[in-house]
């Protein structure tokens, strides 16, 4: 159960950060950032397995792989923007965090336009003239 490892590691780091924060707040923040990155690196194998499985399903379903890759990129942008915004909020920079979230949303919209275009064209073709 990998979740127990993640939770245990996170709880130990949280207690350490609380103790260190009283003496050296900068080190506590760096510890929190390090733990967040370590958890992400711990999950890289799982992320790879998920992406590989989704690509196999798309190939079997004869879905254009470009659309699947675009959707996976959109999901990646959402997770990365959320992670960066949370770290920025932890540093007390809520305004910058809001800008990161807005940037992520704009990039997601820009990447989704080709998929939306194909979807709209397909719907229009299905409507009788």
Image (tube, rainbow, N blue to C red):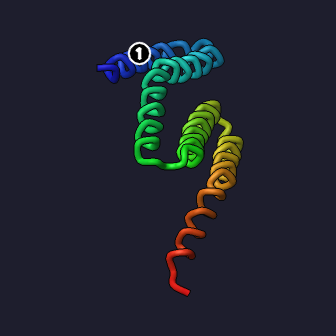
The residue shown at (41%, 33%) is: 53
Q: Residue furthest bottom?
A: 129
The residue shown at (70%, 47%) is: 103
Circle 1 sits in a helix, a strand or a loop, which is it?
Answer: helix
In this rendering, does residue 78 appear at all? no
115 vs 74, nearest the viewer: 115
In this rendering, does residue 33 appear at all? yes
Compared with 19, 108 (above or below) is below
12 vs 116, nearest the viewer: 116
Compared with 58, 119 (above or below) is below
Q: Answer left or right for 45 relative to 34.
A: left
Q: Residue furthest left?
A: 1
The residue shown at (49%, 22%) is: 44
Q: Residues within 10 Å of mark 1 (few under 14, many from 20)?
A: some
Q: Answer left or right for 32 relative to 98.
A: left
The residue shown at (34%, 23%) is: 3
Question: How many labels sit on residues?
Answer: 1
Image coords of residue 47 (percent x, y): 47, 28
| Quarter of the figure that contains the C terminus | bottom right
Image coords of residue 27 (percent x, y): 62, 14
| Quarter of the figure that contains the N terminus | top left
Identify residue for label 1: 9
Image coords of residue 62 (percent x, y): 46, 48
Q: Answer left or right for 45 relative to 25.
A: left
**Which of the 4 image quadrants contains residue 74?**
top right
Image coords of residue 96 (percent x, y): 71, 41
34 vs 116, nearest the viewer: 116
């Amino acid at each position: 159960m990998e979740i127990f490892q993640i939770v245990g590691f996170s709880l130990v780091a949280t207690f350490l950060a609380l103790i260190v924060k009283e003496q050296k707040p900068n080190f506590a923040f760096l510890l929190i950032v390090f733990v967040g990155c370590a958890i992400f690196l711990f999950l890289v194998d799982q992320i790879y397995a998920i992406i590989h499985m989704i690509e196999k399903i798309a190939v079997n379903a004869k879905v254009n792989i470009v659309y699947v890759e675009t959707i996976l990129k959109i999901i990646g942008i959402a997770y990365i923007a959320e992670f960066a915004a949370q770290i920025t909020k932890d540093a007390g920079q809520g305004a910058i965090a809001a800008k990161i979230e807005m940037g992520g949303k704009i990039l997601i919209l820009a990447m989704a336009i080709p998929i939306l275009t194909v979807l709209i064209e397909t719907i229009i073709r299905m409507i009788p003239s």
